[in-house]
């Protein structure tokens, strides 16, 4: 496949940035492209390449030059584009998610299906993808039921993430409203989700938001948005999650709301973004539980999402209207800010 079809040029690689538009109270206009210098980590904005309402989370097809976004609206949608030279996006289709405020989506590793989490209505939608990566009509919509102890944030189910497993591992549906991680298998023939009982329940009031899988396939780390926690789990051969322990997501004083979490490719460090206090916490994974080694300021207060690309970490601060670039020390895991913040209105997702 030609490099230009993948959004890569001789002057560096192109990343895409999603965000909130006026339909959700944001200041963005759609999906922004930016050229990345792999050596310095610098981002050069190329402008808006897709005018679309509140593309708050983005994903790519594993083999085709196709980009997907949720449109986080009351009547939720997913949209798809073919990626061209310099990150240009050519629309190839959109579909209703059958729910409200979809906030996350993921493509199965084999590229056969796309799954989206409807935050507002607490459901997970499934879409088949053809050989070119174009989404077809929705084949399933699984609605979660229940609530948690927080009357404002957990009055009903709020699906926040869909995490497909590699190989035959289960698909995880992380639900903030019901303090649960649901487990599913996908029937490829019908495109329907088959529940694996029982669901994994967190401590009441955790408000699970995002989950990161370790490269070893055995460990997982779940951030609690409501109780500012990081909980470590062991994933067994039968797809069950067994809790190993819990640590605080931040040492800072204030109202901490963890957002994104990821494990470095070498499996040695865990990174957690903390809204409210505007930090990224760095944990070593050398022991039984994550151990904090550093916590760096992002320059804003609301780091909504970040992406680890090579030796650099790119933090999207939704309220500060910027993406901040950090260089990562691969030996210590510690982050150091480089350059000036890159202005992007209401950014919520950075896609390598």
Image (spheres, helix red, strand yellow):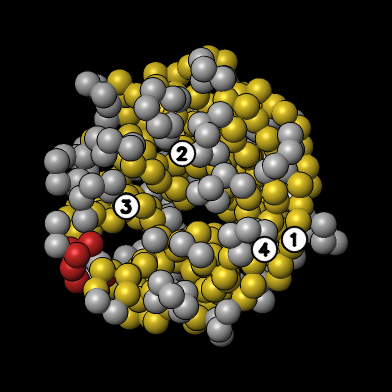
Tell me the residue at 59%/50% (across/down): 261
Q: Residues within 10 Å of mark 4 (few under 14, many from 20)?
A: many
Residue highlighted by disc 2: 162
For the residues marked 3 and 2, what is the alpha-carbon distance in whole angstroms? 14 Å
Residue 167 shows in this picture = yes
User: In the rendered view, would you say 333 is above or below 132?
Assistant: below
**Counting residues from the N terminus, which is met first, the one under dot 2 or under dot 4?**
2
Looking at the image, can residue 147 be seen?
no
Q: Is residue 158 left or right of residue 229?
A: left
Residue 329's spot in the image, x, y percent? 61, 64
Q: CA distance from mark 4 to mark 1?
A: 6 Å
Contact flag, marks 1 and 3 (Cβ < 8 Å):
no
> Dot 2: few (<14), some (14–19), or many (≥20) neighbours within 10 Å?
many
3D distance between C-alphas at marks 2 and 4: 28 Å
Mark 3 crowd level (few <14, some 14–19, many ≥20, 10 Å Cα): many
Q: Residue at x 22, y 21 (%)?
A: 189
Q: Which mark is residue 314?
A: none
- Relative placement, left or right, of 61 versus 288 is left
Please state which of the two labelled residues, at mark 4 or mark 3, is closer to the viewer.
4
Which label sits in the foreground, 3 or 2? 3
Sequence-wise first label, 1 or 2: 2
The label shown at residue 60 is: 3
Q: Residues within 10 Å of mark 1 (few under 14, many from 20)?
A: some
Quadrant in which the N terminus is drawn: bottom left
- Decide which of 105, 147 is in the foreground and name it: 105
Q: Position of residue 112 (x, y in %)?
A: 24, 35
Query: Is the C-beta separation of discs 4 and 1 under 8 Å?
Result: yes
- In this figure, which residue is indicated by the disc labeled 4? 334
């Amino acid at each position: 496949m030609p490099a230009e079809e993948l959004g890569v040029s001789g002057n560096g690689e192109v990343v895409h940035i999603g965000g909130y538009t006026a339909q959700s109270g944001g200041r963005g206009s759609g999906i922004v492209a930016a050229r990345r210098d792999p050596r310095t980590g610098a981002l050069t904005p190329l402008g808006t390449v897709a005018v679309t309402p509140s593309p708050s989370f983005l994903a790519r097809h594993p083999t085709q030059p196709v980009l997907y976004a949720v449109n986080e609206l009351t009547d939720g949608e997913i949209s798809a584009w073919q990626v061209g030279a310099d990150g240009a996006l050519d629309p190839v289709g959109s579909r209703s998610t059958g729910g409200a405020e979809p906030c996350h989506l993921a493509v199965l590793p084999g590229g056969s299906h796309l799954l989206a989490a409807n935050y507002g209505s607490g459901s997970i939608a499934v879409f088949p993808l053809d050989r070119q990566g174009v989404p077809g009509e929705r084949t399933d919509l699984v609605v979660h039921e229940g609530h948690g102890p927080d009357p404002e944030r957990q009055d009903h189910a709020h699906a926040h993430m869909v995490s497909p497993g590699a190989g035959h591992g289960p698909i995880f549906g992380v639900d903030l409203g019901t303090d649960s991680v649901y487990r599913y298998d996908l029937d490829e023939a019908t495109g329907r989700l088959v529940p694996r009982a029982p669901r994994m329940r967190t401590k009441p009031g955790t408000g699970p938001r995002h989950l990161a899988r370790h490269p070893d396939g055995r460990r997982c780390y779940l951030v609690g948005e409501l109780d500012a926690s990081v909980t470590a789990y062991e994933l067994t051969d039968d797809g069950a999650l067994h809790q190993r322990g819990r640590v605080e997501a931040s040492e800072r004083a204030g109202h901490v709301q963890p957002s994104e979490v990821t494990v470095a490719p070498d499996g040695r460090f865990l990174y957690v973004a903390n809204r409210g206090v505007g930090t990224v916490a760095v944990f070593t994974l050398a022991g039984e539980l994550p151990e904090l080694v550093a916590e760096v300021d992002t320059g804003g207060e609301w780091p909504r999402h970040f992406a680890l690309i090579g030796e650099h970490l790119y933090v999207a601060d939704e309220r500060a209207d910027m993406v901040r670039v950090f260089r990562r020390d691969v030996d210590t895991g510690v982050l150091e800010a480089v350059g000036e913040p890159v202005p992007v209105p209401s950014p919520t997702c950075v896609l390598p």
